[in-house]
Image: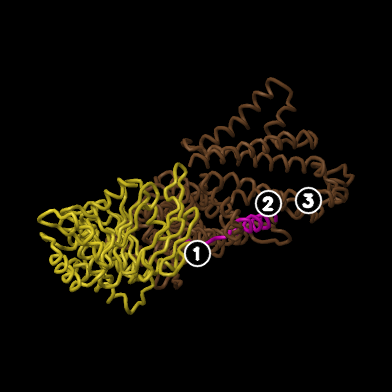
Chain colours: A brown, B yellow
Amino acid sequence: MSIAIFNNNPELKRNVLLELTRQRLILMPLIMGLIYLISFNFGSSGSFATKANALSQLMFAIIIFGWGTWQATTSFIDEINDRTWDQQRMTSLHPITMMVGKLFGSTIYIWYGAVMALFIYFITSLSLDESVLKIKTGITAILLGILGHAVAIIVSLLVIRKNRDKSKINTRPISILCVLFALSFISYVFPFHIFGSLFIADPQASWYAFELPKSTLTLIFVIFYLSWALLGLYYLVRGELQFANKPTLFIIFLVCNAIIVTGLIPNTGINNSSNWTHLNEIEIKTIPTSLYIYTFLIYCFISAIISSYFIVIMDIKDFIGFKKLMFLAKQKTYKLLYNEIPVYILSLVFAAIVAIIFTIYALLANPDKEAWGYNYYNISKTGIPFVFAVLLFAVRDICIFLWVNFTMKARRADTLALTYLVILYVLIPILASQLADKSLLNLFVAMPGNGPLLTMIPPAIQAVVMVYILRQRFKSAELLS
Amino acid sequence: MPLKYPIMVQVENLTYDYPSHRALDGLSFSIPSGSITALVGPNGAGKTTLMRCLAGLTRPLMGSIMINGTDVLEDPRKVHRQIGFLADFFGLYDKLTIYEALTYFAKAHDVPNDEVDKRVLSIIERLHLSDKTHADIGHLSRGMKQRVAIGQTMVHNPGFLILDEPASGLDPEARHDLANLFKELNKDGITLLVSSHILAELDEYSNNLVIMREGKIVDNDFFEQKNTDTRHLLLKLTQPNTELLSILEAETQISNIEATETSASFDFDGTETQQAELMVTLIRKGLSVLSFAEEKVNMQDKYLNTIKQK
C-alpha cells in the first residue's frame, strides 16, 4: 500500500477526469471574465486595481467557501448514494491518498476558478497599500478554504457513520449547514474590503507573552485548526478504510485547543487589590499564572462537556455497539475495547479527570486569590460543586440519549432525546420557579452558590437513576434481540 | 468437508446482530479452494450480511473468518488484496469509459504502473468487451455493466471472488454469458462464492452448496467432488426382485443404499471401469437391469429437501 499525495493519486486523477472536462475548463474563465467586465462597467468609483482586488476577494470567497464547501460535503456521500463506496473501501488506497483525492479532487474545478481569482488578487495587491497584509490575508483565505472543505468532509463522514445502514443519504441539509459555517469565514478574512472598502490597520494582538499583528495571529490559528482538521479527517478516512483508530486523538485535540485559546486572555489586567480612589491610580499588573491555569482547566472542561453532547448526537448509538463492548470486556481484549469506546464517553471521562484536577488545584492554589485580590467567585466553595454538578447533569443527559436510542421502536430518537432535555432544562425549571422557591432550580439546572450539597446531590441522584434505567433498558434490549 | 481439499474460507462461530434481530447465528463452515460455491437461502436468511462480513466490510459481534490463511477481522486490508466483492446493488462511474474505470481500480489496487495497461486490456478482452473499451459506462447495457463491475473486482487478480446476486436483472442471454464467465474464472483457479435465487443457473456451474436459513447454515455440501471416485448411482430393474438389497449389500464398494424391489440408489466407490464390472456382476446375479447410471444431484431438489427437513 503506497502513499500517493498528488502525484499518481488515482482518486485525484479520477476526479480530474470527471471534473475538468474541456467545456468546463472554457466555461469558468468565460463566466468570471464576464462578471469582471459587468462589475467594472457598473461598479463604484475607484482605481482599476482596487476594484479588481476587491472583486477577486469576493469571487474567491463565494467560489471556495460557498460552492467548494458544497462540493466537498458531497464527495463521500455521493459515493454512498451511487453505491460505489464499498468498491473504493476494498481498494488498497492509503487513507492519505484517499483523503487528498477527495479533499482536492472533488473541489478541483472550484480551485481552478479560485486560483484565477487569487491570481488577480495577488497581482493587484502588489500595486496597492498594505500589500504584505493583503498577501497574508490571501494566504489565510486559501487555508481557510481548505479548512472549510475539510470540516465539511468530516461532517459528511460522521453522517455516513451514523447512517451506515442506509443506501441513500440526503446531502442537502448537511451541505447547507456546512456552507453557512464556511461562509462565516468571510468576516475573518475579508472584514474590511468587502463591506465598505474601509482601511483598518493591522492591530497588535497578544497571545500569552507574545505581541503579534492580528493578521499573523489569525494565520497561526488557521494553520493550527487546519492541521487538526486534516488530522481528524485522516483518522475518519482511516476508520472508513477499516484501520483501527484510537479515540485518544480527540482528547489531545481538546487539550491543544485549550492551550491555544487560553493564550488569548489579556496578559495584563487591573489589580483589584489596590486601594485606588481615582482612575489615574489604577494599577495594571501582569495576569498571574494561576489565572491561565484556571482558564485552561475550565476551557478543557467546557469543551469536553460540549463535545460529549455534540458527538453523542452525531454518533451511532444502537445497543449492538455496547454489546460488542461488553463482549470485548468479557474476552479481556482491552486493546480492542479501547479502540471501540465511543468518543463521547471518553470525552466525559476526560471532563471528570479535568474536574478532579481543577478541584485539587483550586484547593492548593487559593493563596493566589490573596495575591491578586480580584473579587470573582470563591473557587473552592462555589466553583468545585458547580463543575461536578455540570458533569453529573451531562452523565444524566448522555444516558437519556442512549436510553432513547436503545429502544427498538424509537424513531428520530435523537430528536426525542433533545425534546426531553428541553423539558428538563427549560419548561420544568420555568414552571418550578413560578410555582415554588427558586432554590428548586438546583434540581434541574447546575447553579453555583447554593452550597455543595444542594448543588451536587440532585444531579448525582438523577445521574445514578438514569444509569440504572439505562442498564435495565440494555438488558431488555439484549433479550429482545 | 473432507480435509484433503485445501480451504479458502474457514468461518467459525460467526455471529452478527442487528438491533432488531440476529442476522448470523454462530455460523461455522468452510469453502474449498477452487470451488464455485452457491450460497442459497430464503430472503432474510443472512446471505448478504455473511458476504459483507467475509469481504471485511462489516464487523461481526463475534467469531472468526480466515480467508486464505488471513484473519479478516484482524487484517481486512490484507484480505482485500486477495479477494474481490461485488455487492447486490452496486454502482459504477457512469461518466468514465470502461478503460478509465478499470485503470482507476487497477491503480487503486496498487497494480504496478507498467502492468496497468496490459492488465486492463486483458480483462476487457476476457469480459468480451473489447469493442466497448472507450465507451462511457453509462451507455452500456445492464449485462455489460455487470461484466464491467466484475472486471473491477478482479482487476488485481484476486484468488477469491464474492458475488452477491450477480445475475439479478439480467436477460437469459446475459445470464448464460455470466455463467460461462464464472466457469472460465474457475478454470483459472479462482474460487467463487455466488449467491442467487435462480437455483437452476447455480446448478450449471457450482460444485459446492451452502444453504442458509434464519442466520444459520442448514447444509454445506461439496456435492460434486471432482477428485474422488465416489459417485451416487441409480439402478432400475424391469422386474421386481426381492433380493435386490441383499445383492447390493454383498458388494464391498457400495454404501448408503436406498432400495425398493424395482430400484436402488447407492454410493459407489470405484472407477468407471469398476462401475462397468459391477453392472456385469449384477446382471450375472439375475437382476434384470433397465438402467444403471450416475445420479446427478439437482441443486433445486436438494435445496427444497433441505429447507423442508430443517
- Residue A32: where, in percent of width, then height? 35, 57
Residue indicated by mark 1: B74
Can you see residue B227?
yes
3 or 2: tag closer to the N-terminus: 3
Mark 3 = which residue?
A269
Dot 2: what SS? helix
Outermost residue to the right: A275
Same chain for marks 1 and 3?
Answer: no
- Look at label 3 and name its amino acid: Gly
At label 1, the amino acid type is Glu
Element assignment for label 3: strand
Q: Which residue is mark 2?
A: A300
Q: Is residue A184 magenta?
A: no
- From the top left corner, tell me how far across and down residue A334 is, in percent: 61, 59
Q: Answer few, some or many: residues within 10 Å of disc 2's Cα (few below 14, many 20 plus, some between 14 and 19).
A: many
Q: Quadrant of the N terminus of chain A?
A: bottom left
A476 or A196, nearer to the observer: A476
